Amino acid sequence: MAAARHVAIIMDGNGRWAAARGLPRSAGHRAGVEALRRTVRAAGDLGIEVLTVYAFSSENWSRPKAEVSDLLGLFRLFVDRDLKKLHENGVRVRMIGNRDTLSDDLLDLIRKAEMLTVDNRRLHLNIAFNYGSRDEIARVMRDLALEAAAGNLDASEISEDLISSRLDTAGDPPLDLLIRTGGDTRLSNFLMWQLSYAELLFVETHWPDFGLDDLASAISEFSGRERRYGGLGAAETATA
Ligand code: FPP
């Protein structure tokens, strides 16, 4: 079985981790950032090429105002303060998600991080922020429709490859493995196009407790699974 090149994570369970310790949810998110730092290091060490993490969904705006501003602050700090270290460690940073409604100063920070790290090759980190999979697909569809209406695109040329090449994850290898921590078994509007042939792994561990060993065992579980992409497995092919 081939190695996992592209791994995505739904980092869930910060609030429950904090509640179990009698701490405010904000402490859970802070511990979640530590877990993200650990996991980025671990992903590089394990030879993963692309790590895509769900930091803030387009639905998360409906959380209480204080929590939203806490998460925005943590994202800002991560992109700003961790940037030098990420760059030194060969991490390329890219934000995926809807940029239309983000403030100018946040967009400047994101652009700065993306430009500084664009040539880094050790690990590509996609941070999904203000991200929703349906929104991502709708943005692609709107753009293609506008191009067709302007006469710059023949609608018969719209293919799976063309759509993939317009998604926020354009250029990345196909998604191999999705890990969701925190025990829930939902996709929560994350990477639904990209997940078509990915393996899904749901673990009980709350995100702040996640680390190198958890990622290593997820990768090893992935390596043990047989991916058939709609075809036959090795055993069936041998006896066919
Ligand atoms: C889900 O936990 C987690 C989030 C909504 C945000 C994920 C954010 C981080 C890991 C830290 C921030 C990192 C960056 C870069 C912004 P939850 O609050 O839904 O937990 P619960 O399900 O236990 O309530």
Image (cartoon, rainbow, N blue to C red):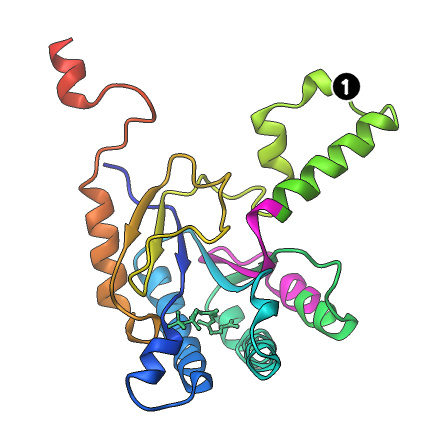
x 24%, y 45%: residue: 222
161, above or below 231, in the image: below
Kindly give the residue lying farthest to the bottom in the view shown: 22
Q: Quadrant of ligand 1?
A: bottom left
Toward the viewer: 83 or 145? Answer: 145
Kindly give the residue lying farthest to the top in the view shown: 240
94, above or below 18, in the image: above
Q: Position of residue 18 (x, y in %)?
A: 35, 83
Q: Quadrant of the N terminus?
A: top left
Q: Position of residue 46 (x, y in %)?
A: 30, 58
The range drawn in magenta is 111-134
Q: Where does label 1 land, which residue?
A: 154
x 69%, y 19%: residue: 157
In the figure, residue 152 lies in which quadrant? top right
Tell whether 30 sits left or right of 207. Answer: right
Kindly give the residue lying farthest to the right in the view shown: 150
Q: Position of residue 37 (x, y in %)?
A: 41, 73
